[in-house]
Amino acid sequence: MSGAASTVQPLLLALHSSSESLGVAVQPLGEPVATARVESFPLGRRLSNELLPCVEQLLPAVQWPQLGRLAVATGPGGFTGTRLTVVLARTLAQQLAIPLHGFSSFLLIARRLLASQSPHEVGQRLWLEQVLPRRGSVVGCYGFDPAALGGVAELELPRLVRPGESWGGDGPCAAAVVDPEADALQLLELAQLAQAVDLAGPWAPVLPLYPTSPVEGL
């Protein structure tokens, strides 16, 4: 019985809650994207009560010991929602002694937007902006980089630009719109690349990103 259990293929879990919807994706480590299962849950403020039941719809808790690697979106996003999934991912990684990778939700959006462009345009910069009512905008910058995991690098971390302030960019901004399922799949892809090169994933440095005050939220 123990020999059979040891042959179970490890799983990869991705969590994304940097918007009003929770994105959850699961697939076996080392398998193509076609094997992934992904679902989104429009929870809003109900995330704190329904996070675990939603995760268990795709991966029951009894299977969590099969996890071999984790990925989580670190924001920018709402204070409570982003924090809850990051805390869950950190706890699982620590308890199961498995790698955890945190990626900015803006980076995941940038990867989707740059996918239709030529990766040979190294140095091209894509600015992303999320407008916050009455508080300004959160702005970040991204571009192709062959040395970066997955080929897209975060050139400038998302930061808050107050109303009337200059954001200092060198081009137009694209809207930073989260697609919870597509971005959860981006998390899987990046974590699979990390697995392929045996990249370490210590859980301790994975922290939520809050460009605004936690009291204000996004």
Image (cartoon, rainbow, N blue to C red):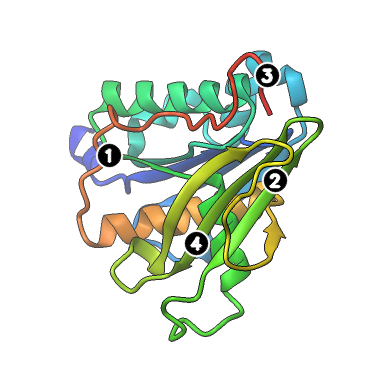
Q: Which residue is mark 2?
A: 130
User: Hey, what amino acid is under mark 4?
Assistant: Tyr
Q: Quadrant of the C terminus?
A: top right
Q: Image quadrant of residue 46? A: top right
Q: Residues within 10 Å of mark 1 (few under 14, many from 20)?
A: many
Q: Would residue 47 be visible to someone looking at this image?
A: yes
Q: Earlier in the sequence, mark 4 or mark 3?
A: 4
C-alpha gap between disc 2 and disc 3:
15 Å
- The residue at 33%/64% (across/down) is 148
Circle 3 Cα neighbour tier, 10 Å, few/some/many (<14 / 14–19 / ≥20): few
Secondary structure at numbered mark 3: loop
Q: Does residue 85 lie above or below 36 as drawn?
A: above
Mark 4 touches mark 3? (CB < 8 Å): no
> Callout 2, which amino acid?
Gln
Residue behind mark 1: 99
| Image-quadrant location for residue 12 | top left
Q: Position of residue 205 (x, y in %)?
A: 29, 31
Query: Which residue was labeled with disc 4?
Result: 142
- Tell me whether circle 1 and circle 2 mark residues in contact (CB < 8 Å): no
- Label 4, secondary structure: give it: strand
Q: Which residue is mark 3?
A: 216
- Contact between marks 1 and 3 (CB within 8 A): the answer is no
The answer to whether 92 is drawn above or below residue 104 in the figure is above
